[in-house]
Image: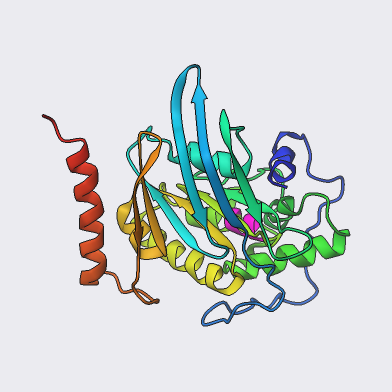
Amino acid sequence: MIATALRVHDTPVLETLPLWQPAERPVQEPPTRARSRERDAPGGLAVTVRDLSKAFDGHTVIENLDLHIPAGQFVAVVGRSGCGKSTLLRLILGLEQPSSGRVVLESEGVRPPPKRIMFQEPRLLPWAHVADNVAVGLGETGTKAERRARALTALGEVGLADKAGQWPATLSGGQRQRVALARALVSRPGLLALDEPLGALDALTRIGMQAMIEEIWQAQGFTALLVTHDVAEAVALADRILVVEDGRIALDVKVEVPRPRRRGDPILAALEGRILDHLLQTHAPA
């Protein structure tokens, strides 16, 4: 569970013996381009929210919200600061308890796949090698050899197989975020929540990360829930965009543009303009 993965951040050591050991021969990075959906991918979790409300100290942040996200859909949530985007994300993940209403997660398998979250900050363990940081996402699952193998596979998927034995401090900001993405993916989640994960990156690195997230999502089939202030990012990545205002869903817009999407596409630009116009007009001064 998510709590298992995050709880390790509070412990003084990762393991007495590190997972990472130099490989006898170079690890081959598995290709990610133009992959079909993986055969062993567990599939996505369907999300159903009914009459959901959340208040903090008497202040209502989410109010009587209803929502259904089919398994495998990529949904982006946008809105102004303080509108309830991140609170909705945390309620769906079970990191916050609702004041009323309910959240139901459903999967086709007998054992539902895990949920994972990726934050704006990488939150890597500075005393652990890159491979050990990725293995944190497995909790206590598997033997040492199995955990190392799965960590290396996840690093290959984000293009960092050759960085497995390095320390986080030696990586660039974009590389650290890719390690955080690998950590979120290593357990093969059914729901991947992305809470402004690319906000601190430069423009070109951000575009590259967007393409990588989209590609891995297409290959693995998990349900993706992205919270972002960047409407252009939402339009580029999502099947569907939710505009949240005052704790409610004000707009629910489908993005019916084939993938791969081209930046500057007039249909995407028009959709971005429509959402921005709504946000600006709603809060325009009287």
Q: Is residue 212 visible?
A: yes
Q: Nearer the viewer, residue 64 or 163?
A: 64
State the residue at coordinates (47%, 53%). Answer: 226
In terms of secondary structure, what is the magenta stretch mainly? helix
Instruction: Using the image as rendered, state which of residue 138 and residue 129 is in the foreground.
Output: 138
Q: Is residue 171 visible?
A: no
Against 40, is 3 above or below?
above
| Depicted 57 relative to depicted 49: above or below | above
Residue 105 image point, x, y percent: 64, 52
Query: In which quarter of the view is residue 82 placed?
Result: top left
With respect to residue 112, does 259 lie above or below?
Answer: below
Examine the structure image and report whether residue 223 is included in the region drawn in magenta: no
Examine the image and state in which quarter residue 254 appears. Answer: bottom left
Q: Residue at the location (86% across, 59% down)?
A: 142
Which residue is painted at 79% across and 62% down in the image? 110
| Residue placed furthest toward the top | 57
- The C terminus lies in which quarter of the figure? top left
Numbered-mark total: 0
Residue 149 in the image: state x and y as whole percent.
78, 67
- Counting from the top left corner in percent of width and height, residue 215 is at 51, 71
Q: What stretch of residues is rendered in magenta?
A: 180-185
* Residue 53 higher or lower than 66, as above or below: above
